[in-house]
C-alpha cells in the first residue's frame, strides 16, 4: 500500500496542505509561479507550510531570491521508463515557453533533461547570451559536462527517434563551447520550476 503523502501548496489557486496529488494538482496546474512540494509526514508538511519552505531551512533564509531569474529552466516528462518523453525550456522569471519537443517514444526522463539542456545551450548561443540554465536533474547536468549521456537505453528501431536527438546533442557538445553556467534547480527550496510538467 502506498504511503500517505501530504502536499503543501504555498502559492496556487488555494494554499494549504492537501492529502492527495489530485487535490494538489487542482490548485497548481496551469498557475504561473505555483509553489508546492510533497512530504511524507503531516508534521513536516505543517512546519513547511508555516515556514514557507522546507522545514530543514532556516525561517530567516529567503526562498525566492536564491535563484537567478534571468535564466532558462528546462524540464522533461516521461510516461514510463522508457516511455513517451517530452521536454521544454522556459524563461525562469515568467515561465514563457521558448521551446518544446515531443512526445517521442521510448525515452527516459534523464535523457529528456540532457537533450533539453543542450537545446537551451544551442538556443542561447544563437542569441549570443550567457544566461544560466537550470535543471532539476543532477544526472543530466553531469552528462552535459561529460559531453555524453551514460544511458543504458538500447539502440534499436524502437528507440531510433530518441537516439537521433541524443546523437545531435552529443555532436553539438563536441563541436561547441559555452560559458553559460549549468545550475541545479533546488526544488526543496524554491518549489517546482516554471518548466515543470506537473505530472508527479
Image (cartoon, rainbow, N blue to C red):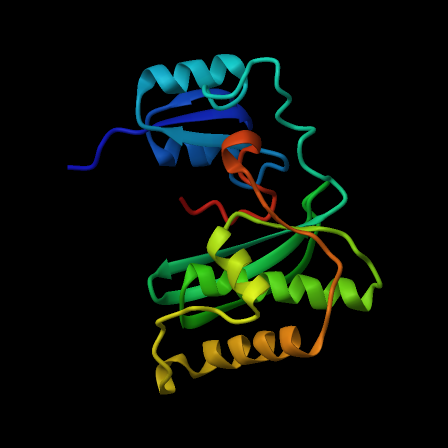
What residue lies at 64% left-to-right and 66% top-to-bottom? 119
Vertical position of residue 130 compared to residue 119: above or below: above
> Which residue of the protein is positioned furthest toward the right in this rendering?
128
In the rendered image, which quarter is residue 157 located in?
bottom left
Left-right relation of 138 to 64: left
Q: Position of residue 181 (x, y in %)?
A: 69, 52
> Which residue of the protein is positioned furthest toward the bottom in this rendering?
157
Q: Position of residue 179 (x, y in %)?
A: 75, 59
For this rendering, which residue is in front, 181 or 27?
181
User: Could one spot residue 188 in this view of the protein?
Assistant: yes
Vertical position of residue 115 compared to residue 33: above or below: below
For this rendering, which residue is in front, 123 or 182?
182
Q: Position of residue 96 (x, y in %)?
A: 71, 49
For this rendering, which residue is in front, 199 or 115?
115
Vertical position of residue 31 compared to residue 44: above or below: below
For this rendering, which residue is in front, 102 or 153?
153
User: Could one spot residue 27 in this view of the protein?
Assistant: no
Q: Quadrant of the N terminus?
A: top left
What residue lies at 59% left-to-right and 48% top-to-bottom? 195
Left-right relation of 183 to 197: right
Vertical position of residue 146 compared to residue 175: above or below: above
What residue lies at 49% left-to-right and 12% top-to-bottom? 50
> Which residue of the protein is positioned furthest toward the front in this rendering?
146
Amino acid at each position: 500500500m502506498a504511503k500517505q503523502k501530504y502536499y503543501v501548496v504555498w502559492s496556487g489557486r488555494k494554499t494549504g496542505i492537501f492529502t492527495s496529488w489530485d487535490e494538489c494538482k487542482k490548485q497548481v496546474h496551469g498557475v504561473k509561479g505555483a509553489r508546492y512540494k510533497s512530504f511524507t509526514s503531516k508534521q513536516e508538511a505543517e512546519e513547511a507550510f508555516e515556514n514557507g519552505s522546507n522545514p530543514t531551512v532556516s525561517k530567516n533564509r529567503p526562498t525566492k531570491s536564491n535563484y537567478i531569474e534571468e535564466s532558462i529552466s528546462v524540464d522533461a516528462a516521461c510516461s514510463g521508463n522508457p516511455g513517451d518523453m517530452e521536454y521544454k525550456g522556459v524563461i525562469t522569471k515568467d515561465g514563457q515557453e521558448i521551446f518544446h519537443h515531443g512526445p517521442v517514444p521510448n525515452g527516459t526522463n534523464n535523457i529528456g533533461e540532457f537533450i533539453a539542456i543542450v537545446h537551451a545551450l544551442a538556443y542561447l548561443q544563437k542569441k549570443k547570451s550567457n544566461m544560466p540554465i537550470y535543471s532539476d536533474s543532477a544526472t543530466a547536468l553531469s552528462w552535459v559536462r561529460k559531453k555524453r549521456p551514460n544511458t543504458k537505453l538500447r539502440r534499436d528501431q524502437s528507440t531510433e527517434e530518441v537516439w537521433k536527438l541524443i546523437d545531435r546533442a552529443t555532436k553539438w557538445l563536441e563541436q561547441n563551447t559555452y560559458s553559460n553556467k549549468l545550475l541545479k534547480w533546488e526544488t526543496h527550496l524554491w518549489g517546482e520550476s516554471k518548466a515543470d510538467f506537473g505530472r508527479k
